[in-house]
Image (cartoon, coloured by chain):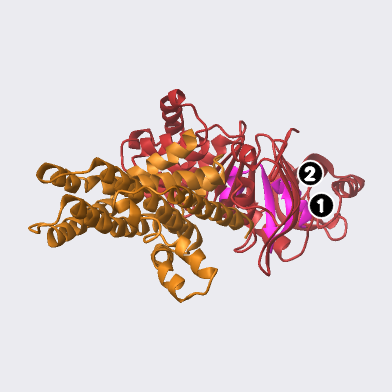
Chain colours: A orange, B red
Amino acid sequence: MSTVLLIARRELRAAFAGLYGWAILALVLMLDGLFFNAWTLGSQRPSSEVLSLFFYTNFGVTMAAAVFVTMRSFAAEREQRTLVLLLTSPAGDWQVVLGKYLGALGFVLYTVAAAAYIPVMVWLKGNLEWGQVAAGYLGIALAAAVCTAIGIFCSTLAPNQLAAGVAAGFLVTLQVLFWLLSGISEPPLDGVFAAMDLYREHFEPFQDGAVHLKTLVYAPTVSYLFLLLSVRVLQARRWR
Amino acid sequence: MTVIVRTDRLTKSYGAVTALAGVGFECGAGEVVGVLGLNGAGKSTLLRILAGELLPSGGSVWIDGVELGDDSREMRSRVGYLPEEPPLYREMRVRDYLGFVGALNGVARHELPDRIAVVAGRVHVDGQLDRVVGELSMGYRKRVGIAQALLHEPDVVLLDEPVSSLDPAEIVGMRELVRSLGGRRTVFTSSHHLREVHETCDSILVLHEGELLAYGSQEELGVLAGRERVEVEVRGTAAEAAGRLPTGVEVVHSAELGDGVSTLTLDLAGAEREEVVAALVGAGFGIRRLEPVRSDLERVFLDLVRGDGAGQAGGENGP
């Protein structure tokens, strides 16, 4: 576990060592602030609706942040030829992938936390339901876990950062568009697609304050699946 | 000889391209081994497999008795590896970078400061520890790369082209550094620079198109290439002695030393030293000295890769 945390800590520090991490953080804060300003400030919406809209926005922004952060993960190390350091160390492939994953997820959650001033404003000026806040942030964390795992997988697979970003962007977008596929599919596929939809099926209830057990199973399962695939890609690269 | 690295019929293919084809050798503890070959010979592939970065398509590798595949992590903990391009995180300070790599390789946290100080002093980067890696010259980056490979005190150190991109002064320093690593550790160093190999290595492993052409000391490779040379000091004139040599033996160089003594450098061209001695003594020449001459590595290497001689030198080196 110490090796996993060691790698995760380095990832997190590396994100803030250059402009890249700060740029993502600034973008997240800007988008969250702009949408909050445009949709809720000056309106007569109830606090629960304001908070729901904030989580809706934050969900999309967090997904984008996960893609931008993870596209660098393995792909950048491969481009800079530093990945060999991890692959020739006594660290196992699972430890490397988990360390990278937790580092990236830590950064994504940091961006989420940085925008927490918005719920604080709602609390100061409105009537905040703490249950909705907790559920919303739990939903954001679960969605971030899924999107980060997808991004890590794409980063292990892609030859460069751009390709990793495009692939992760596509897969993450697909995750929130499964409901469209569900609408045009016949049973039982429509049910399968609907169950896989990240936003409507698994996040929307959370933003309104409802915690669903199926999502508590879905998010770790999908995350594990993509991390397992990432490990397999690393192992396959040793055989290539 | 304590065998520390052993490979057996080691094969690696990249699709249809065979990078290594049945390479087998044994290497003793403390040896400095030069891995020599033209571009695409398989040098880097061999080192990457020994480092545990790649797995072989066939054959086996043992490092200190631990086989790659059985417990690759255990094997990797016994190896320090510097790829051709040092794997450095440019945004980190040298001290932090070495601390990270040391911890990654299992060095206890409380041991790290001392270990970093010792290794940094050894590779002469102790004055650079608080600098950001990205600001270092290529020479210092290579040295930091070697430091990270030494931090966990591995049994085997693998250096892929350690002098590439270095200026002449840095090359001299690197040569001394590589030489100094031998004895306590087994070092593999690949290079295009024959002089590096000549001056730093105890033995040489010649790869060509993925095949092991030869492995042994420089003298042994000279024999393999059919180019064993000896220097003979005789009482008598060089011209007369030259006329009495066995058929095929060539005089490469001769000189009169005075007092009726002369010296001849001979290319034996397959003849035995005993034949030379017998011919000269039979002709009445007194032999004052006979000793082998180190062959010119460049010539030996080219003879080997052109197919003039192939095989393994030194029975104890072959598996």
Host chain of mark 2: B
- Find out whether residue A125 is within the magenta segment: no
Query: How many numbered discs sit on the rendered protein?
Result: 2
For marks 2 and 1, the one nearer the N-term is 2
Q: Label 2 is placed on what type of residue?
A: Val
Taking the image as shown, residue A209 lies to the left or right of residue B141, namely: left
Taking the image as shown, residue A236 lies to the left or right of residue A51, namely: right
What is the spatial separation of the Cα atoms under label 2 and label 1, in whole angstroms?
8 Å
**Residue B37 occupies which quadrant of the picture?**
bottom right
- Give x and y (percent) for residue A122: 15, 47
Q: Mark 1 points at which residue?
A: B241
Look at the numbered disc 2 and give the secondary structure of its residue. Answer: strand
Residue at x-position 86% and y-position 45%: B277
Seen in the picture, residue B296 relative to B115 is either above or below; the reply is: below
Q: Label 1 is placed on what type of residue?
A: Ala
Residue at x-position 59% and y-position 37%: B77
Residue B234 is marked as 2
Taking the image as shown, residue B67 lies to the left or right of residue A132, namely: right
Host chain of mark 1: B
For the residues bearing labels 2 and 1, Cβ distance under 8 angstroms: yes
Q: In this view of the protein, which residue sits in the foreground, B163 or B48?
A: B48
- Give x and y (percent) for residue B258: 69, 43
Residue at x-position 33% and y-position 43%: A13
Labels 2 and 1 within one chain: yes
On-image quarter of the N terminus of chain B: top right
- Find out whether residue B219 is within the magenta segment: yes
| Region in magenta | B196-225
